[in-house]
Amino acid sequence: MPTSTSVPLPDHVPAELVRPFPYILGEKTAKDPYSFVPDIHREPPVFWAERVVNGVSGAWVPRRDQDIRALFHDVEHFSNRGLAPFAELLGESWELVPAMYDPPRQGDYRRLLNPLFTPAKMALLEDKIRAYARDLALALRDRGGCDFMRDFAFEFPIRVFLELMGLPQDKVGQFLEWEHGLLHEPDLEKIKQATRNVNAYLWDECEDRRVNPRDDLLTFAVRDAAVNGEPFTADEITGFCFNLFIGGLDTVSTSMGLQFRHLAEHPDHQATLRANPDMIPDAIEELLRAYSPILNRRLCIKDKTLHGATIRAGDMVMVPTFLANRDPEAYSRPDEVILDRKPKHLTFATGPHLCLGIHLARRELRIAMEEFLAHIPEFGIAPGAVIETYLQGTISPVAVPLVWRA
Ligand code: HEM
């Protein structure tokens, strides 16, 4: 949690490698949240940022595409263990499954889970996802404006998540509350309470699926999921459900918020996509590149030298995909959105932890854009509005006030 004090510089970190880095828990900006990136790309290839971990301790920050790409693959030196201490907060023992496991064990879980999230499996959700997006857009059309975050971006992925898990749609309000308690509250007690509530609810639903199996992911978790012949333990069931909750909601909401802000501020791009909806899938990839929302991290578990800096076992390393994606050595005009660029971006990571929900996320983002553009006339940012953005674990707009002619 944010405090005003920061941890002293470790002995092995040279003072000349300490650099400013604004993406810190508790910080917000009224500027374009990516406007700091070009300056960061004038810094050394890896530097030390103070207070970047939970607003308290420092960490290494590599900034180049090729180094961050390599880091995602380097499981000999970098680990995911213990990086999301939700269970620790509660004095419990579960871990996010599979996010907090390292290979080779993590691979056993991915072999089990990947078949559930293939493009073909996600295509089965197409009509439902489209109906949720359309209903939300149609409900807004005559209002002439909305806060895109509150009125669309948060609710839409929750509806998709409920569908995927086999949970009732009338829980959407409850899930909105839990998600905000967990991810948008600086108060530790609220985070704990929200974590407890989500898990208690999901656990009750899992218990129900043991006796009333259905074709949903909760039933899979309690009846079919087994690794090396061993059915999922209670901790694994909790960790799996919670990983989907934490991985699949805020990431999508935030990406949509950043992307729709871009369209509102770039009427030429909006017009191009309205006239050519078949360009939307490529546009989404370019927008994902330019507006990568997550600040991942890794724990160094074996000393590693990178561009002359010694990263010691025990050091935290940030994995800022938004820096990699705007690296001038990897992309020409990196800060410009070129709708048909077709970038090989790192927004969904690469290597063993490549996002499990990548095909679902792409589908959600595409459908949301298709339906919103189909049903809402040309929109812009509300006159005089100042958009504030959190610069913490996810680069996330607080609100995106849009207006259009009703
Ligand atoms: C735009 C939306 C999304 C973005 C930007 C995103 C990004 C990422 C990234 C960067 C990772 C790797 C993290 C790391 O290596 O530390 C990841 C992992 C993961 N994501 Fe996503 N994600 C998105 C949507 C989703 C959705 C919709 C789901 C759920 C269905 C999901 C489930 C997961 C899971 C379970 C993992 C852990 C995979 C593993 O460790 O093997 N994500 N995601």
Image (cartoon, helix red, strand yellow):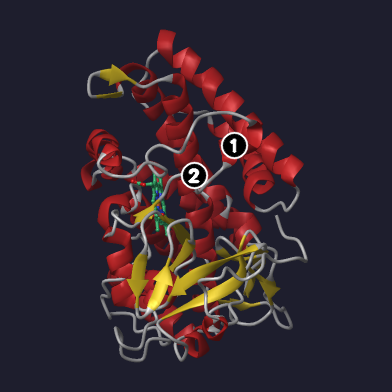
Q: Can you tell me whether the CB of the residue at mark 2 lies under 8 Å from the nearest atom of ligand 1?
A: no
At x 50%, y 49%, the residue is 83
Percent of width and height locating residue 46: 43, 78
- Residue 397 vertical placement versus 326 (above, below): above
Mark drawn on residue 118: none
Q: Can you tell me whether the CB of the residue at mark 1 lies under 8 Å from the nearest atom of ligand 1?
A: no
N-term mark: 1 or 2: 2
Front-most of residues 246 and 137: 246
- Residue 266 vertical placement versus 154 (above, below): below
Residue 350 picture quarter? bottom left
Percent of width and height locating residue 284: 36, 68
Pointer 1 with pointer 2, Cβ within 8 A: yes
At x 50%, y 83%, the residue is 37
Mark drawn on residue 82: 2
Please tell me whether mark 1 sits on a helix, a strand or a loop.
helix
Please tell me whether mark 2 sits on a helix, a strand or a loop.
loop
Percent of width and height locating residue 110: 27, 40
Three-letter code, disc 1: Glu
Front-most of residues 295 and 138: 295
Label 2 environment density (alpha carbons within 10 Å; few <14, some 14–19, many ≥20): some
Three-letter code, disc 2: Gly
Q: Is residue 224 visible?
A: yes
Percent of width and height locating residue 218: 41, 25
Which quadrant holds the C terminus? bottom right
Left or right of residue 36, residue 368 in this image: left
Front-most of residues 199 and 280: 199
- For disc 1, the marked residue is 88
